[in-house]
Image (spheres, rainbow, N blue to C red):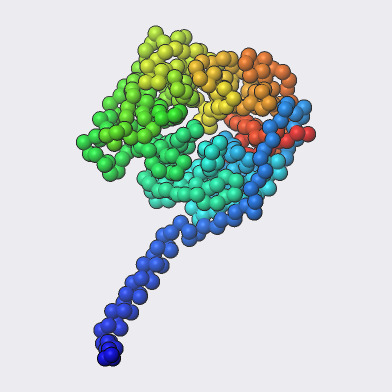
Amino acid sequence: MARVKPERRRPIDFAITATIIVLVAVAGLIAWLVSPVRGTTSVQAQSTPPEVEQPAAVPDAFAPRWQAASDATVVPAIADSVVVTGDGGTVVGRDPASGDELWSYRRDLDLCVVDTAWTASTDLALAVYRNSRGCSEVTALDAKTGARKGSRTSDADDELRLVSDYGYVVAQGSGRLETWGSNLVRGIEYGRVEAPVRPEDEAKRKDCVIYSSAITGDRLSVVERCADDPGYRLTVLGALLDDDERVEQYGSTLITGDVSGPPPVVIAMSSTGIAVYDGGASPAEPPALGGDSGPSIRRFDSEGVATGSNTVAGDAIPPKDSVPLGGDGVVTYWTGKATVVLDAQSLKPIYQVPATLGPGEVMAGQLLLPSASGISVRDVAGGREIRSIPLTRSTAPDGVVSLRVIGEMVVEQRGTTVEAFGPA
């Protein structure tokens, strides 16, 4: 067999090879510099935390167990068996009873918001970080271990609110919103859209400001105000694009006659309707369903048509950090003067409790609401106070206090502090 002579390499060949190596190295360096991995520290849990046991009864007394700074949450972020806090650029999964760090995830960016979602299934902690595009970098973490489960990035506003149910999360800013599934794949984007897939479908209403939102199943509702509107508007949308790849709108109606007062707040949504807190400063539309003047819970059907109204005690300007809490068949919302308790399906107010400090949740079949002295334990169905449990809080309440429950633990958020109380 004839011997094949090796190919002779010329100086130009070596120069080209060297150039390619340099370009690949530069590209790799650039990719590393812009990668979220740079500036990220992840410490995962050594084992999965035990399941939280549900108490048979509300404890007779509670004592302080731990507290932590959490400026990225407005209400305690409760996962299946972990309390999640977010402060600065660090997200921490904590043991509910001791507050010990089970895992942590840290980036060299500031957090916009931290929340939990899909706690009954994938059980994720969502960490939203701020970069030059707003609150646009989202990381999903396994709430039990802190393992990274996914990420996404897109255009976003400088402030963001996460609202979720069992199916989707709404990431809502003042200029746009998105829906995500548990895989973080976007369902819809609404409001400001930089690059619409179908320019012919561009929204007819322009320059809209989105104030609040709620979601259930495959529909979401928003209170917004657009440039040509004389009042505030309630709009109902599909959480996913329709078969023609369009955002489906089920209804959109002006619900106030002007904007002399603050915008109403969507506080809950069910398969049959929508509940909106209206401080009463702007005239309600339609007036016949507005009831007496003043604060009220207004009800609308699943297409945004008004169906009724109930006057409640409350402030004309809704408390900024008052977030509705739902579970065990009820929704609680603090109006600034009282906690209103709504049936989670019909969304009709069942009763209201004055002299509370915020919304609460159910433990062992009884409703726990934060009060100036501690916890008011109430009958869920009728609101009768069963007893009052004193609490020794680390700081005096100032503003809204949001009370959540995980097992036999009570977890409160006051301002930027999360504090947990356990059986004494």
- At horizontal 39% and vertical 8% (from top left) the residue drawn is 288
Q: Is residue 201 left or right of residue 70?
A: left
Estimate the x, y position of residue 257 in percent, counting from the top left. Answer: 35, 17
- At horizontal 67% and vertical 15% (from top left) the residue drawn is 384
Which of the two residues, 112 or 104, is positioned nearer the viewer here?
104
The answer to whether residue 336 is visible is no
Q: Is residue 17 left or right of residue 105?
A: left
Q: Image quadrant of residue 58?
A: top right
State which quarter of the image contains the N terminus. bottom left
Estimate the x, y position of residue 114 in percent, counting from the top left. Answer: 52, 42
The answer to whether residue 287 is visible is yes
Number of callouts: 0
- At horizontal 37% and vertical 23% (from top left) the residue drawn is 234
Depicted 390 relative to depicted 44: above or below: above
Depicted 163 relative to depicted 21: above or below: above
Which of the two residues, 249 or 387, is positioned nearer the viewer here?
249
| View extreme (front): residue | 1
- At horizontal 54% and vertical 18% (from top left) the residue drawn is 343
State which quarter of the image contains the C terminus. top right
Estimate the x, y position of residue 27 in percent, counting from the top left. Answer: 36, 67
Estimate the x, y position of residue 291 in percent, counting from the top left. Answer: 45, 9
Depicted 44 relative to depicted 262: above or below: below
Which of the two residues, 22 or 323, is positioned nearer the viewer here?
22
